[in-house]
Image (cartoon, rainbow, N blue to C red):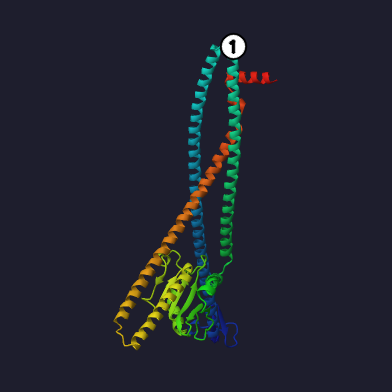
Amino acid sequence: MPKKLNVSIKDKNTLVLEEDGSKGDLIDLLELDKVDKDSLIETLNLEKDNLYKEKLQEERKRIEEEQKYKEQARINDYETKINNLNNSLEKAKQENETNLKLKEAELNKQNESKINDLKLQILDLKNKLDNVTNNKDRDIKEAVNSKEIEIINLKNDIENKKNQAELEKNNIKNQYEILLKEKNDQIDYYKDLKARMSTKLVGETLEQHCQIEFEKLRATAFKNAYFEKDNDSRTGSKGDFIYRENDENGVEIISIMFEMKNQNDETATKHKNEDFFAELDKDRKEKKCEYAVLVSMLEAESELYNQGIVDVSHRYEKMYVVRPQLFIPIITILRNAALNSMAYKDELQLVRNQNIDITNFETSLLDFKTAFSRNYDLASKQFNTAIEEIDKTIDHLQKVKASLLGSERNLRLANDKAGDLSIKKLTKNNPTMKARFEALKENDN
C-alpha cells in the first residue's frame, strides 16, 4: 500500500523530501505546510536588489538626460548670442558699404562736373587758339608752360598729401592695432582665468583682491589699523577678515567683520547674498565687532546690489552689502562716522563734566546724522554717475572703433585714386592738350 511522504517547500520551483520514499509513494499537495524561509527570504532580497538596481539605473539615466538638456540649452543660448552678433556685424558692414557707394557716386558726379567744366574751358581755348595769329604763339607757349608748372605743383601737392595720408593711416592703424591687442589680451586673460578657476579659487581671488587694495593704502590711510584674516574657528565658524582701529590712547574706534563671497558662472548652485547674513551676524557678535560687511559678487544682475552700498540693518544690526569696488569706500565711510562719533562722545563727556546743558549736543548729533545721511546719498549718487560715465565711455570707444575701420577703407580708396593720377589720364580724350604736350616735348628735344 503506498504511503504519503513528508515534504517541504524550498522555493517556488523546488520541493524537498523529508523522508525516504519509493516508487508509488504519494505527495499530498493540500497538506504542504513546511516552507524553507531562508531560501524564500534570499529570493525576496535578490528580487529587491534587482528592483533597486533597476530604479537606480533609471534615476541615473534621467539625471544624465536632464544634464544633457541643460547643457544643450546653454549651448543654444551661446549660439544665439553669436548669431545675433554676427548679424549685427553683417548689418553694419552692409551699411558701411552702402554709405561708401553713395559717397563714391557723389564724388564721381562731382568729378564728372569738373571734367565737363575743363572740357568747356579747353574747347574755349581751342577756339581762341584757332583765331589768334602766329605772333600769339609765344603767349600760348607761356600759358602752356604755366599750366605745366601748375600740373607739376599739383602732382607734388598730391604726392605730399598722399604721403601725409599714408602716414596718418599708419599711425591710426598702429594705434588701433595696439588698442585691439590690449583688449584681446585682456579678454583672453579673463577667459583663461575663468576656465582655470574652481569655486574655492574664485573666492580666494576676491579675498586677495580686497587684501591687495587695502595694503595699497595701509601706509597712508590706515596706519593704526589691524586688518588680518580671521583664523579663529574655535566657535565653529569664522569670517574672512577683521578690521580694527584704535586711537592714540588705545581706545577702539571701529571694528568690522568682513566676509567675501564670489560665484563661478559655471557653478550649478547659485547662492544669494541673504544666504550668508545669519552666519556673518553670528561671526560679528562672536568676534565682538561693531559692524558686519559682506563684499559680494553674487546676484550679478540685481539692481539692488548694483546701485551701491546696501544697508540691511533692518534684518541684521549694523550690516552692509557692497560690491568689491566699494570695499575701501565702505571702510572710509564707517571709519569717518566712527571718528566723528568719538569726537562727539568726547565733547559730551566734557559738557557733562562742566554741567552744561546737553540740548545743543543732541541738536549737533542730529545735524551730524542728517549730514552723514546726505553725504552718503551724495556718495552713492556720484558712484552711480561714475558707473554711467564708464558705460558711456565704453559705447564711445565702440563707435571710435567702427569709425577707424571705416576711415581705413576710405584712406585706402583715396590712396588708390591718387596712385592712378597721371598726365596720360589727364590728357585722355583731349587731342588738343595731347598735341600741345607732344609739341613741348619735341621742342625740348
Residue type at tag 1: Asn
The front one of 28 and 115 is 115
Residue at x 51%, y 71% (from the top left corner): 55
Residue at x 58%, y 88% (from the top left corner): 19
Name the residue carrying label 1: 134
Whether residue 385 appears in this view of the structure is: yes
Number of marks drawn? 1
Neighbours of disc 1 within 10 Å: few (<14), some (14-19), many (20+): few
Q: Position of residue 325 (x, y in %)?
A: 48, 67
Q: Does residue 406 sit above or below 185 in this rendering?
A: above
- The reply, left or right, for residue 253 in relation to residue 352 is right
Q: Does residue 413 sit above or below 260 in this rendering?
A: above
Residue 275, quarter of picture: bottom left
The front one of 327 and 57 is 327
Quadrant location, the N terminus: bottom right
- The reply, left or right, for residue 68 in relation to residue 384 is right
Residue 353, quarter of picture: bottom left
Q: Position of residue 4 (x, y in %)?
A: 53, 86
Q: Does residue 277 sit above or below 267 in this rendering?
A: below
Q: Position of residue 292 (x, y in %)?
A: 44, 77
Q: Position of residue 109 (x, y in %)?
A: 48, 29
Q: Which secondary structure lies at badge 1?
A: helix
- The reply, left or right, for residue 151 in relation to residue 253 is right
Q: Does residue 168 sit above or below 45 in this rendering?
A: above
Farthest residue to the right: give it.
Answer: 445
Residue at x 49%, y 57% (from the top left corner): 77
The front one of 363 and 433 is 363
Quadrant location, the C terminus: top right
